[in-house]
Image (cartoon, rainbow, N blue to C red):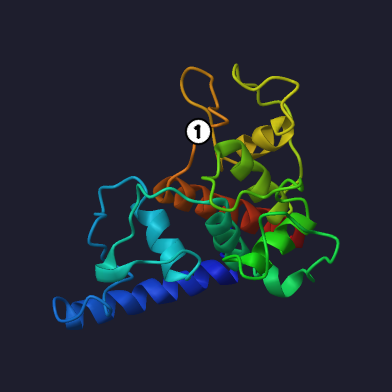
Amino acid sequence: MKYSKRNNLILLFTTISLLVSSLFYGLTANAAIIMKFSDLNKQHPAYSSVLYVTSMDYMNVYKNAAFKPQKAVTKAAAAKFVGKANDISSEVKLASHISFEDVSHKTSNYSYIIALTSINAFDHGSKFYPQNTITRQEAAKLFVNAFNLPIKTGKEYVDVTKHNSYKDYISTAASYNILKGNSSKKFLPEKKMNRADFAIALKKALDAKDELDESMAE
C-alpha cells in the first residue's frame, strides 16, 4: 500500500525526534516530548497512537510532558481534536443557522463546534453540552461524518437497538476498526471516553480516511 503524504510526514517527524532525543536526552523535556511522556510508557496500548496525534499537534500535551491518558474528553475538546486533524475550521464556513443555548463565541473551541455541527458530525439540538464527556456513540458519529467515511451497515451489537439514532454510525465506525465492540458483542454506546481511548480512535479514523483516499486515487 502506498504511503500518504501524512504518513511520510509523521515518519520524518519521528526520525527527527529520535535524533533530537538521542542528543539532548535528559536535558530538556520539551526537546524529547514527542518521544517521551511522563505518564505513558511504550507498553501502554495507546502509546503509538498518542505519539502520532501529539506529534502532529492534533491533541495536546500538558506540562511536564504529561498526556493524562485517563482524563475525560469533553465534547468541546473532541471538537478541537478532530477539527485540527481534519483542518475543519478552514474548510467549513461557519454556518449562521447553527446555534446552541449553551455555546457562544466565548466558549472554548467555538469555531470547531459550529463547523462540525454544520456537517452533522454533532447533533444539533437546543443545547450542545460542551463540558459533557463525549460518549462512544457520539464519537462514532463525529469520526464518520467529520472524515466523510461512507456508511457501512451490518455490524450488530446486543446493546445497540434499531431505534438508536447512532446505529449506522456505530456500525460504520466498527467496520473501519475505529471503535469496536467487546467479546460479549456489546458496543457500550454510552460509555464515556478518556484521552487514551480517543487518541486510539482518532488515529484509526485518520488511517481509514487515508486508505479510502488512496483507494479512490488508484
Residue 8 location, x and y as percent?
51, 71
Residue shown at the point (57%, 66%) measured from the top left: 108
Most extreme residue toward the left, as rendered?
A: 26
Which of 213 and 51 lies nearest the eye of the viewer? 51
- Horizontal relation, residue 37 to residue 2: left or right: left
Under mark 1, the amino acid is: Lys
In this rendering, the answer to whether 154 lies above or below 86 is above
Residue shown at the point (43%, 46%) measured from the top left: 194
Residue shown at the point (38%, 50%) measured from the top left: 71
Most extreme residue toward the right, as rendered?
A: 97
Residue corresponding to mark 1: 191
Question: Could you tell me which secondary element the residue under label 1 belongs to?
Answer: loop
Residue 19 location, x and y as percent?
27, 80
Which of 216 and 149 lies nearest the eye of the viewer? 149
Q: Quadrant of residue 162?
A: top right
Residue 74 location, x and y as percent?
51, 51
Note whether residue 191 is visible: yes
Note whether residue 2 is visible: no
- Horizontal relation, residue 9 to residue 126: left or right: left
Mark 1 crowdedness (10 Å alpha carbons): few <14, some 14-19, many ≥20 = few
Residue shown at the point (55%, 31%) measured from the top left: 190
Quadrant showing the C terminus: bottom right
